Image (tube, rainbow, N blue to C red):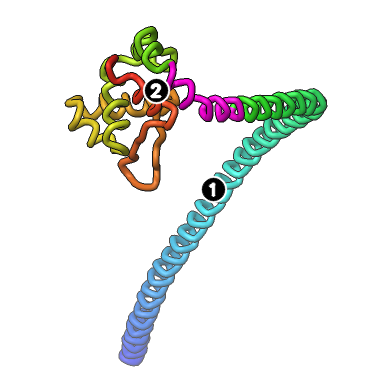
């Protein structure tokens, strides 16, 4: 009887040991699954937090852009207000100019009348000069010697302001015909700049005619000056 009890006890102990081993193995399995699930959950949380951080950064960037646009909008508004002020001032000036238009029109009419009078005067003067030139051969035949003696070329009214070099240039052009500034430079032995200024001055003062068909420009003495220079050979 005792042996049976001991055998049953041993059997129960063996079954308990096997059950305990199986239970422990299940516990270990569950623990491993828990750790794996915990790791997976941690990765999910980290990924979720990263997504949230990215969205937060995007929202921050959008907020910054909105602030910049708001600032730009204020700047544009200020510029628009300034432009409105300028346009108002311009409109005022246009109104003022419109008010002055009748006065300018009257002045322009007066100027046109003055120009017309000047043109008529010039035409009348040209006609008188033409008549005098037609009579000059007859008069010069009688008085040429007296005029050359009484009025040397240096005291002629038309040449009173000329220097010796300028007179020399006029004489060369009257004698040799049309020349360019470089050709005159070789004749009178001046620098290029000095010669250019001298020829320009004589042209602007009305002593020379200038041809601009090609560069360098060429110059020639006006007919009136050529006649004066030819009448005074001794004075030169």
Question: From the viewer's perspective, is 102 left or right of 72?
Answer: right
Question: From the viewer's perspective, is 55 left or right of 103?
Answer: left
The image position of residue 79, as x and y in percent, is 65, 34
Residue 181 visible in the current orientation? yes
Which span is picked out in magenta? 126-142
- The image quadrant of residue 227 is top left
Residue at the (78%, 28%) spot, across then down: 105
Check disc 2 and report the residue beneath it: 228
Q: Quadrant of the C terminus?
A: top left
The image position of residue 175, as x and y in percent, is 28, 32
User: Which sits in the foreground, 5 or 100?
Assistant: 100
Q: Secondary structure at mark 1?
A: helix
For discs 1 and 2, the disc positioned in front in the rendered view: 2
- Mark 1 burial class by Cα count in 10 Å: few <14, some 14-19, many 20+: few
- The image quadrant of residue 12 is bottom left
User: Which sits in the foreground, 38 or 180?
Assistant: 180
Residue at the (24%, 32%) spot, across then down: 184
Whether residue 134 appears in magenta in the rendering, the answer is yes
Question: From the viewer's perspective, is 114 left or right of 19?
Answer: right
Task: Reply above or below: 147 against 214.
Answer: above
Label annotation for residue 60: 1
Whether residue 137 appears in magenta in the rendering, the answer is yes
**First-in-chain label (1 vs 2):** 1
- The image quadrant of residue 160 is top left
User: Which sits in the foreground, 8 or 218?
Assistant: 218
Kindly indicate whether the residue at mark 2 contacts the one at mark 1 (C-beta within 8 angstroms): no
Q: Quadrant of the N terminus?
A: bottom left
Residue at the (70%, 29%) spot, across then down: 116
Q: Secondary structure at mark 2?
A: helix
Question: From the viewer's perspective, is 107 left or right of 141?
Answer: right
The image position of residue 100, as x and y in percent, is 79, 24
Residue at the (54%, 48%) spot, across then down: 60
């Amino acid at each position: 009887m005792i042996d049976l009890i001991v055998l049953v006890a041993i059997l129960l102990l063996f079954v308990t040991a096997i059950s305990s081993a199986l239970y422990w193995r299940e516990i270990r399995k569950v623990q491993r699954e828990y750790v794996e699930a915990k790791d997976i959950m941690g990765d999910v949380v980290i990924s979720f937090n990263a997504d949230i951080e990215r969205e937060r950064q995007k929202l921050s960037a959008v907020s910054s852009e909105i602030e910049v646009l708001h600032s730009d909008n204020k700047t544009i508004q200020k510029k628009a207000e300034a432009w409105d002020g300028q346009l108002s001032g311009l409109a005022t000036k246009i109104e003022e100019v419109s008010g002055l238009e009748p006065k300018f029109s009257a002045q322009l009419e007066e100027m046109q009348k003055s120009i017309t009078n000047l043109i008529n005067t010039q035409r009348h003067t040209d006609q008188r000069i033409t008549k005098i030139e037609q009579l000059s051969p007859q008069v010069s035949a009688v008085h040429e010697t007296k005029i050359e003696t009484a009025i040397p070329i240096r005291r002629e009214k038309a040449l009173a302001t000329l220097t010796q070099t300028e007179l020399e240039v006029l004489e060369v052009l009257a004698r040799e015909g049309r020349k360019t500034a470089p050709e005159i430079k070789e004749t009178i032995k001046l620098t290029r700049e000095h010669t250019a200024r001298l020829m320009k001055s004589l042209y602007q003062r009305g002593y020379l005619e200038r041809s601009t068909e090609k560069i360098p420009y060429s110059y020639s003495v006006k007919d009136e000056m050529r006649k004066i220079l030819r009448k005074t050979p001794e004075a030169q």
